[in-house]
Amino acid sequence: MRIPSSTLSVGPRSLVLVAASALALSACSKKAPESLPPAPAASTTTQTTPGTLGPVAGSQADFIAKMMGADVIYFDTDHYDVDATDQAALARQAQWLMQYPAKRATIEGHCDERGTREYNLALGERRANAAKNYLVSLGVSPARLSTVSYGKERPVALGSDEASWAQNRRAVTVTID
């Protein structure tokens, strides 16, 4: 069956009619609800036991909560020596680790962005080992501690200034099961 070409042509009147129909349909969209549903609950990585509020004793979340920032120690540029502030933080870590003798920990060594990749990997290793050696001197078994160096590959601060670099020159203790 063949349709005459005069039927297929669209005139100005037809275009106006189509545009008006589209406008009318778009005006019929749903109204906004009077009240919004509650926001989704924030996901947490802390484990809780029934009837308690807080992390499970001996978990990484418990370690972080008890350390209150002392799970990280900081270093001066190109240094890996453990100063008095670091010693106090590591003493708190050792105390927690002694309380949970089955827990193991990894000490991560980090550097700022300056220097070569190889230099920073070596410096990060020295920083992690310095923290490990101090924990061992406080009575933590060396068999429970491992080290890893990330060099400059995992910065916590992305700026290229002294404040950012200072945050990235660190050793972080992470407990593992």
Image (cartoon, rainbow, N blue to C red):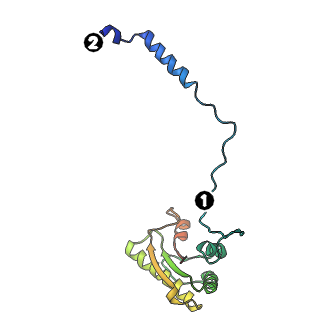
- Left or right of residue 151, residue 62 in this image: right
Q: Position of residue 46 (x, y in %)?
A: 62, 67
Total marks shown come to: 2
Foreground of the two, 8 or 130: 8
**Residue 59 locus on image (x, y percent):** 60, 75
Identify the secondary structure beneath mark 1: loop
Q: Is residue 150 left or right of residue 70?
A: left
Residue under pointer 2: 2
Which one is closest to the eye, mark 1 or mark 2?
A: 2
Residue furthest to the left in view is 2
- The residue sitting at 44% across, 12% down in the picture is 14
Left or right, 94 with reference to 79: right
Judged from the image, the secondary structure of the residue bearing numbered disc 2 is loop
38 shown above or below 31: below
- Which residue corresponds to mark 1? 43
Identity, as a three-letter code, of the amino acid under mark 1: Ser
Q: Amino acid at mark 2?
A: Arg
Relative to 57, does residue 140 appear above or below in the rendering?
Answer: below
> 21 or 122: which is nearer to us?
21
Q: Residue at x 45, y 76 (%)?
A: 149
Q: Position of residue 130 (x, y in %)?
A: 51, 85
**Location of the N terminus (image quadrant):** top left
* Image position, residue 167 (x, y; %): 55, 69
